[in-house]
Image (cartoon, grey):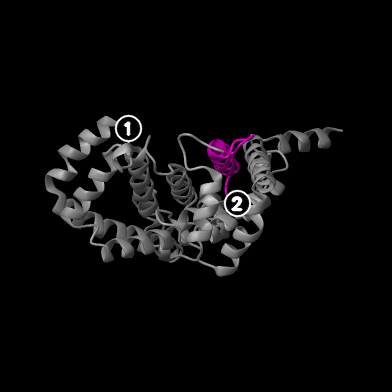
Amino acid sequence: MTETDSQQGTLGVAILRIVLGLTILFTWWGNISDDFYTADGLRGFFDWVFLSAEDGGNGSSLSFIESIIDNTVLRAAGFFGLLQTIAEGLIGLGLLIGGFTRLASLLALLFFSGLFLTYFGGEEWIWTYVVLMAASLTVFLNYGGRMLGVDQLLARSRGESPLGMLW
Amino acid sequence: MIPGWNLALARVLMGLLWLYSLRWKLPPDFESSTETPLREWLELEVEHAAFGFYGDLIDSLVLPNFMLFAWLIFLAELAVGLSLLLGAFTRTGAAVGLMLSLNLLVGLFEVPGEWPWSYILMAMWHGTLLMSNAGHVWGLDGLRNSRKETQ
């Protein structure tokens, strides 16, 4: 199977993808060094996120997000910490090398959308997540691994991935 | 090439980013009751300067002439925001936006609570907009271009 025009990579998208991958990997490594992905680390983070700004927290305003996190992530913080460690590392690596980029960028988009909603209404500069979401969406829509990426080799040797969702 | 609508969406988002960020640097006094005001950000850049020359520059030139530089920053960010939002003179707007993003990166690199990758990603997006015809879809640049072609 040959690539259509829209499925051929471009240099601009490849640069976006690589910078996005580096961003995730550097932050991931910093978080590991700071024990962020432990049960206590995650609990401390979410306590700060939803604590009011007057009390030194972020003061996020979406109560339904707080409720979801309370009833999911914080009920099994150790498990979610491990899951987050693995997922973030793989997403960053996938984007950096351009391997399974469609899946990695879609997961990145979901991840940053989640962070956007989590921080929304608080002290955190929310536009950081808008910029990250725009970059992830662009990499996903434009088959960001098809130039300077492993996906280019995969597409040539194996054709299109199932539903076009892997590379 | 990245599809036009995708670039246009990114361009509009970057425009809104600059306009929204004017909130804590509004004339005439450039103060804010709810956000960290511009002067305080500049003082933080001096206190936590990652590059000595930059901290010295802010301390010796910008802060003593705060009102002049506050107006310059306000007008530059307003112009970039409007340029990118409307797609008017988009490459110029993106070039100035790129310089402003790099300035933020250098100045805020080691300020506590700041995430330098935000400014790297902003610089990357403005570089992408600078190298493309992002104002030709959903933008006044495209309108001007099509008028020229029909004349």
| Residue at 58% from the left image edge and 53% from the top image edge | B101
Residue B21 is inside the magenta segment: yes
User: In the rendered structure, which amino acid carries the disc numbered 2?
Assistant: His
Q: Is residue B19 visible?
A: yes
Query: How many residues crowd around disc 1 within 10 Å: few (fewer than 14), some, or many (20 or more)?
Result: some
Q: Is residue A9 visible?
A: no
Circle count: 2
| Residue at 64% from the left image edge and 45% from the top image edge | B70
Furthest residue toward left: A75
- Label 2 SS: helix
Query: How many residues crowd around disc 2 within 10 Å: few (fewer than 14), some, or many (20 or more)?
Result: many
- Label 1 SS: loop
Of residue B50 and residue A166, the one placed in the foreground of this image is B50
* Residue A61: mark in rendering: 1
Furthest residue toward right: B151
Q: Is residue B31 left or right of residue A153?
A: right
Of residue A31 and residue A56, the one placed in the foreground of this image is A56
Quadrant in the picture for the N terminus of chain A: bottom left
Please provide percent x and percent y for residue B52. Answer: 55, 69
Please provide percent x and percent y for residue B24. Answer: 53, 39
- The residue tagged 2 is B126
Which quarter of the figure has residue B19? top right
Q: Is residue A145 above or below residue B75?
A: below
Residue A128 is inside the magenta segment: no
Q: Are marks 2 and 1 on the same chain?
A: no
* Chain of the residue displaying label 2: B
Q: Is residue A165 above or below residue A93?
A: above
Q: What are the residue bounds of the magenta stretch?
A: B1-30
